[in-house]
Image (cartoon, grey):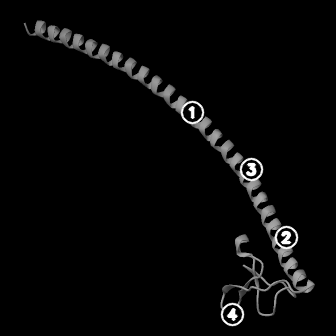
Amino acid sequence: MRLAVLGAVPAGQYVSTRWAEDWRPGHVVDPSTSVTTQYDRAVTSLDDLDRRLHIVEAEVARMREQAAITSSDAAAARVLAGGADRDVSEVRAELRAHTQALNALRETQLEQAQKMSDGFTTLIVGIAQMTNLLQKISESNDD
């Protein structure tokens, strides 16, 4: 981003405000070539000093604006991070609750499976006894 400081820089030249380190006394950008140049002129008049001071003041104002924006962005990022942390905490709590419910369901299913296995064993033994009794009755009828 380049800023033309009206009346402060010779016609056809722009002060670079892209980075703080770009600015040095007499540091200007030629817009036709986009090349940064350095001129070595001593301050020869109060107008020259006033122009340079105006450039510095403009740069300081831009830096203050950027610092305010950065501070605001950092505050917004902290708020978002806090909200995300709360959201993650809530999700973790829900996940723990679901895990506990699934573990309880697993225990219940294991108990029920054991009861069913015991019941089927009793049923198989009972059917085997009935089969033996029926076979004995059938053999006694055949005699």
Precedes in sequence: disc 4 or disc 1: 4
**Nearer the observer, disc 1 or disc 2?**
2
Q: Which residue is mark 1?
A: 96
Precedes in sequence: disc 4 or disc 3: 4
Residue 43, given in percent of the width and then of the height, sits at 85, 83
Is 76 above or below relative to 113? Answer: below
Image quadrant where one finds the C terminus? top left
Identified by mark 2, the residue type is Ala
Q: Nearer the viewer, residue 3 or 56?
A: 56
- Would residue 134 appear left or right of 119 to someone viewing this image? left
Q: Nearer the viewer, residue 7 or 97?
A: 7
**Nearer the observer, disc 4 or disc 3?**
4
- Would residue 141 appear left or right of 80 to someone viewing this image? left
Q: Which residue is mark 4?
A: 32
Identified by mark 4, the residue type is Ser
Identified by mark 3, the residue type is Val
Q: Nearer the viewer, residue 111 or 75?
A: 75
**Nearer the observer, disc 3 or disc 2?**
2
Query: Residue 136's image quarter?
Result: top left
Which mark is on residue 79? Answer: 3
Q: Which residue is mark 2?
A: 61
